[in-house]
Amino acid sequence: MGHLARLLEEGGIATVVVAAQPFRRRLLAMSLPRLVLTPHPMGRVLGAPGDAARQRVVILAALELLQTATQGSTVLELPGTYAFR
Amino acid sequence: MIDSESFTDFKNSFSYGSRTDLNFKFLKALSEEEAAEFFQGLLWKMGDFLNNGDRTALIEHVRDWQTRAYSSQEPTWVYEDGPFTPLTKVLKQTHLALITSTGHYVAGDDPQPFGVAEMTQEEAIKRISEFTGSAPQLSLIPVDTPGEQLRVRHGGYDIRGAQADHNTVFPLDRLRELTDDGVIGTLQPTAYSFVGATAQTRLIKQSGPQWLALFKEREMEAALLIPV
C-alpha cells in the first residue's frame, strides 16, 4: 500500500495511510506523505469489531491529517487503546 | 511426530505451517529466547486476566510482540523522501475515496485469483507465495454495498476481525456516516480493494499506474488508504 500511496501522490491525489502499529518500522522507512499509526493489533486497524466510536475517531484523525499536513513524511501516532464497547 | 519437534519448529509452525495462525506468524521472526519470553508473558497475563478480568494487558502483549517482531526485520523498501500533494480544497469540497489492501470484494464479483472460483481463505493461505509473486487484482466496491454483501479473502492476515465487522479495516459504514454528517464532501461512489500480499514491482510498474489512470478519470482528489 505504501507504493500505491507514493504513486497517487505523484499523480496529484492526496493520500493518508492508516495502519496498525506493528507495521510502524516498514512504513516509516517508505517516507509516506501522511501516515496515521493506530495502537491496535494487526488486522484490526481502525479498532475492535463493533467499536464504531473508535473507528470514527481514527478516521477523523486521518482526515484531519489529510488537510493539515504541509509536507511529506508527516506521521501521527494515535493515542488511545483497543477496547470493546 | 510431536514428541521429536524442536521449539524452533514449533514456533515457526504458526507461519504457514502445521499450526498456521496469521495473528502469530510473527513468531517465526523471533529467536527461541524471544519466543519463549512471548509465551511466558502471554500465559502470565492470562493468569492476571483470570484474577482481574482486565484484557487490555493481554491485547497489548500481543500487539507489542507483533510490533517487536516486525520491527526486527530490515525494511525491504526504503525511501529517503517521497512525493507530496497538498490538499488544496477543504475536505467538504473534496472527492474522497477509500482504497484498502484488505482483500474485500462484493458477493457475485469474486476476482477469482488464478482463475479459481470461490477460493476459500484456507486456499488463499496455502497459495500465499503465488499471491506475492503475481500482479494484484483491483476489486471495485460500490460504497452503498450492504455489509452482508461484502466478502473478504486474504492469505496474509487473520480476516476474522474483518468478518466480524468490516469497519475494522474497510470502513464503509463510518465513511457513509461522516458523509451524512457533512464532514466529507463527496465520497466517491466506488471504493477499491486488493490483496496487499502481491508482487510489489508489478504494483509499481503495471497495476499502480493503470489504477491511477482510472482514479484520475473518476476525479478522485484524495484517498484514505488502509493496509493490513
Image: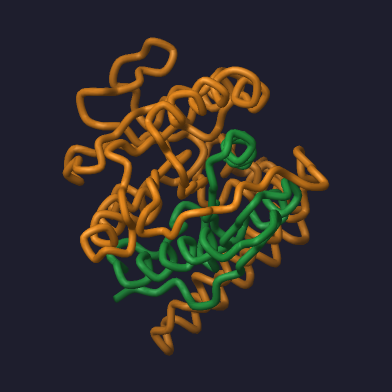
Judging depth in this view, the residue of A82 and A37 nearest the camera is A37
Q: Residue at x 59, y 34 (%)?
A: A11
Q: Position of residue B108 (x, y in %)?
A: 20, 24
Quadrant location, the C terminus of chain A: bottom left
Position of B52 with respect to B164 (left or right) is right
- In the depicted structure, whether residue B22 falls above or below residue B45: above
Q: Residue at x 62, y 72 (%)?
A: B41
Judging depth in this view, the residue of B16 and B168 nearest the camera is B168
Q: Residue at x 61, y 69 (%)?
A: A77
Residue that lies at the very extreme toward the top in this rendered image: B115
Q: Position of residue A64 (x, y in %)?
A: 49, 66
Rendered image quadrant of residue B98: top left
Q: Residue at x 32, y 41 (%)?
A: B188
Tell me which chain appears orange: B
Rendered image quadrant of residue B207: top right
Tell me which chain appears green: A
- In the depicted structure, whether residue B139 falls above or below residue B12: above
- In the depicted structure, whether residue B201 falls above or below residue B89: above
Rendered image quadrant of residue B143: top left
Judging depth in this view, the residue of B117 and B196 nearest the camera is B196
